[in-house]
């Protein structure tokens, strides 16, 4: 099949901006053939937000790949609540279940936005978008808001395509099947995570600038980063230091986690290892950044971390994303990260064992709000209580009779000190 002529012609930085202005002008003239063709893959808040704001530019033909709850989204679209943009329901021009449908329906895309959960040990990330990427044409934008190093597999699979990383600082949450809420800023960073010898740096820069200008037209504060690793580390250092440890020590509450023997030192040392790794990638942080991370990660939150939710529900956890990728980057940079390696070994095994555990009997007094009735005990740590013995308010099992005469005195050793 003959190669397709790119719709978005990129010649230089000036050419990119001129191309975008031309595209917007032509969009106003309803010349749909000149619209930027975008395929957003993933049914999550970031994918929904980007699709919403790109469609709002009237310069993009948006195709949304949405698997879970497809029928509802295809029929009614997606609704957003936002203090900046108001309350709005939008429906992308095309909604499909899988990328293969998008390839058969639309064809060649200028940009493919990959916003799926990064589980490289479960499935091939690059294979997910294989059908919608046109060699030497499609620019691939990977959501790396909570990840490090996942772009490598994409770059290896598509060596002739520009691969950009995205880090979102917008506060986004999912309220329902297709209902989302946006709060705070609209700041988004884009940029290449590595240099591709097959593609001139100017082309990478131009594609990033063109996308940033398009999102800016959609009232998104999109910036091109000269070192996207900086923004990536700023977002992931806290989660990497806290989330794996919270699962290993079965303590969802991060304040309580730091009170456990040795954990505060462990968390501090993991942060230091990540600082050293970030420095090897040209990143710099303010002197008080570590304390800001700890303060942010120990703030009370209405929901538990995704890793904790996956652990409780016995779903695959993002072990490779949180720990495996930093270890690979550390080996390449020859930076020792012994504590991260230890966390990786323990959590990797726990991830396998946790999913193979037989289900426990359903208990009518199970902890409320648990994703499953299995393993209610770990979730006890999320409740507010001063004493670990009885401070969880509503124990997962019925209260044990302590003073009942018909049971006799408790055997020695049954009562434990708090």
Image (cartoon, rainbow, N blue to C red):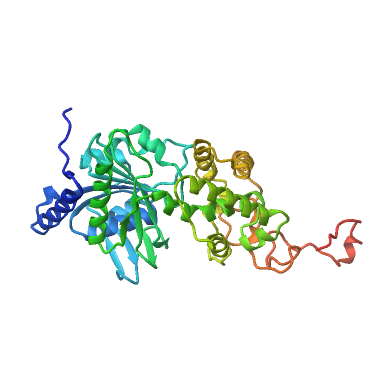
Q: Position of residue 396 (x, y in %)?
A: 68, 59
Could you say where residue 146 lies in the image, as x and y percent from the top left? 46, 51
Query: In the rendered view of the protein, which quadrant contains the C terminus?
Result: bottom right
Whether residue 358 is visible: no
Residue 133 placement, left or right of 29 = right
The outermost residue toward the top is: 1
Q: How many marks?
A: 0
Location of the N terminus by quadrant is top left
Q: Is residue 125 left or right of residue 376?
A: left
Q: Nearer the viewer, residue 119 or 218?
A: 218
Given residues 338 and 87, the one toward you in this image is: 338
The image quadrant of residue 161 is top left
Report the residue at 49% width, 52% height from top. Answer: 236
- Indicate the quadrant where residue 184 lies: bottom left
Whether residue 136 sits left or right of residue 272 in the image: it is: left
**Residue at x 31% of width, y 41% of height:** 99
Work out whether residue 64 can be spotted. yes
Against 152, residue 173 (above or below) is below
């Amino acid at each position: 099949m003959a190669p397709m002529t790119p719709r978005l012609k990129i010649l230089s930085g000036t050419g990119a901006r001129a191309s975008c202005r031309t595209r917007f002008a032509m969009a106003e003239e309803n010349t749909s053939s000149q619209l930027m063709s975008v395929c957003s893959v993933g049914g999550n808040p970031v994918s929904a937000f980007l699709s919403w704001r790109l469609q709002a530019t009237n310069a993009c033909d948006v195709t949304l790949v949405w698997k879970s709850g497809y029928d509802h989204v295809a029929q009614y679209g997606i609704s957003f609540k936002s203090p900046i943009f108001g309350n709005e329901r939008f429906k992308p021009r095309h909604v499909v279940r899988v990328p293969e449908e998008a390839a058969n329906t639309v064809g060649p895309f200028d940009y493919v936005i990959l916003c799926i959960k990064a589980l490289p040990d479960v499935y091939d990330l690059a294979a997910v978008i294989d059908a919608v990427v046109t060699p030497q044409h499609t620019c691939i934008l990977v959501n790396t808001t909570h990840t490090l190093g996942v772009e490598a597999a994409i770059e290896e699979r598509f060596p002739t395509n520009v691969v950009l990383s995205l880090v979102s600082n917008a506060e986004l949450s999912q309220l329902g099947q297709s209902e989302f809420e946006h709060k705070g800023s609209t700041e988004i960073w884009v940029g290449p995570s590595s240099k591709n010898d097959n593609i001139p740096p100017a082309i990478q820069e131009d594609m990033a600038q063109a996308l940033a200008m398009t999102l800016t037209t959609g009232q998104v504060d999109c910036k091109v980063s000269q070192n996207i690793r900086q923004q990536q580390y700023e977002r992931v250092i806290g989660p990497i230091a806290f989330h794996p440890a919270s699962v290993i020590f079965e303590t969802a509450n991060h304040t309580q986690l730091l009170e456990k023997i040795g954990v505060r030192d462990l968390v501090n040392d993991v942060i230091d290892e990540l600082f050293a790794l970030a420095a090897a990638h040209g990143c710099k942080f303010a002197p008080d950044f570590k304390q800001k991370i700890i303060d942010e990660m120990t703030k009370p939150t209405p929901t538990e971390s995704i890793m904790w939710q996956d652990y409780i529900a016995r779903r695959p956890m993002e072990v490779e994303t949180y720990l495996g990728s930093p270890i690979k980057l550390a080996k390449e940079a020859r930076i020792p990260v012994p504590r991260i390696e230890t966390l990786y070994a323990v959590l990797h095994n726990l991830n396998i064992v946790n999913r193979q555990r037989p289900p426990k009997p359903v208990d009518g007094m199970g902890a409320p709000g648990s994703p499953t009735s299995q393993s209610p005990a770990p979730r006890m740590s999320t409740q507010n209580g001063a004493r670990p013995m009885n401070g969880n308010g509503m124990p997962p099992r019925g209260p044990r009779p302590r003073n009942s005469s018909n049971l006799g005195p408790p055997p020695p050793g049954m009562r434990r000190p708090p």
